Image (tube, grey):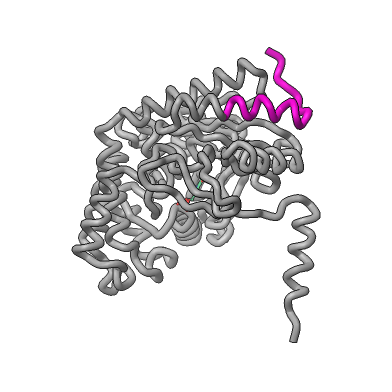
Amino acid sequence: MEFDHLFTEQLDALKDEGNYRIFADLERRCGAFPRAKNHGSGEEVTVWCSNDYLGMGQNETVLAAMKHTLETCGAGAGGTRNISGTNHHHTLLEAELADLHGKEAALIFTSGYVSNWAALSTLGGRLPNAVILSDALNHASMIEGIRHSRADKRIWAHNDVEDLDRKLSELPEDATKIVAFESVYSMDGDIAPMEEICDVAEKHGAMTYLDEVHAVGLYGPRGGGVAEERGLMDRITLIEGTLGKAFGVMGGYITGSAPLVDFVRSFASGFIFTTALPPAVAAGATASIRHLKQSREERAQQARNVAEVRRRLDAIGIPHLPNPSHIIPVMVKDPVKCRMLSDILMEDWGIYVQPINYPTVPKGTERLRITPSPLHTAADIDHLVNALHSLWSQCALARAVA
Ligand SMILES: *Cc1c(COP(=O)(O)O)cnc(C)c1O
């Protein structure tokens, strides 16, 4: 029997649309962040699109904690959390996370994706007359969790508090309303009007479910996210985050009241029926969170580098979306040119920025998503800006009017 044509037909369609994904085969060089070896070309490249936003994946304290725990506890957790897999390092990490967000309790998952999927499907599936009000630009993991919950849902216009208010007013009194949204949206880098969302949710007696994946470690005096920065943590019912982006390791989590977290712990299939995170991973994440709770240096230097890259792009008229976050979307607005720019940057300039095309972003808004870290040097920034300056002319792309 020959089945491969079933697969290749759809893959060919994807390729024809220009939406087929090609991975860069990288080998990160510990201690040389943001450098990596590109196994495609054999050359060293500077990575400008990592979600290891602060380089914590190579932080000495994090590595020491991981090495030590690997030596003392071994490789895997050895089971699900319920059946022999709960290691003391998980308990410590959950306490650290609850403290980070000013909540009673926290629960860790194998990834941020799984935490959103498991928590939303459990809340939506089990709470009486649940209705989930989901921001139109919510991440795939939230959408899948909501879908799997089979709860009633309403999509409100992105960051549009009036639309949210209107949609909440239309719901029956006895509905259990859950407003699900993000703080920093990863593709446009815009930030939710969180205080207004809390006001509207409270007015209608709705819970708030906040994904702070692109903000934890980065915003707030202790890296507790945008809710911490704006003094709103106690007004959010559930805060979800990742250990894989600014914290530089891997895993996801939720935090909230003790009964809420116990509820998800007790009913979420995606939490119960899977092997716990390796203890060394948990210990590394704890070290990373602790470090970023007391050190503001990484966040400050990142902010300086982000401002510098923006200023330099403005000076040469390279169009980028204005936003208040650390994400710089350089707008190319053409899928073929976007991929071509990325290829030339890699081959001729040793710069790696992955092209972001449909369906990750709408057609016509294709972009290079640049994420400056505190470890990019002034020379790295010069090199990036020179490369874009040259390529913009070479590829006949429009410049922003100053
Ligand atoms: C990356 C991402 C996730 C998933 O987190 P992982 O730890 O990478 O699985 C969840 N929400 C948003 C908004 C994300 O961008």
Give the magenta range: 384-402
Left or right, residue 152 beside residue 32: right
Q: How many marks?
A: 0
Which residue is drawn at the image coordinates 55% and 18% (left, top)?
Answer: 311
> Image point 31% across, 50% down: which residue?
285
Q: Which one is nearer the viewer's eye here, 246 or 312?
A: 312
Q: Where does the image place residue 33, in percent across and percent down from the top left? A: 41, 41
Q: Single out the residue that lies furthest toward the front.
A: 42
Q: Is 260 placed above or below 224 here?
A: below
Image-quadrant location for residue 119: bottom left
Q: Is residue 387 magenta?
A: yes
User: Image height check: is 26 above or below 192?
Assistant: below
Image quarter in which the C terminus is found: top right
Q: Nearer the viewer, residue 399 or 242?
A: 399
- Outermost top residue: 402
x, y percent for residue 222: 30, 33
- Residue 162 visible in this rendered orientation of the protein: yes
Q: Which residue sits at x=37%, y=47%?
A: 30
- Image quadrant where one finds the N terminus: bottom right
- Residue at 68% of width from left, 44% of height from top? 357
Across and down, in percent, residue 294 comes to 24, 33
Residue 390 horizontal side relative to residue 268, left or right: right
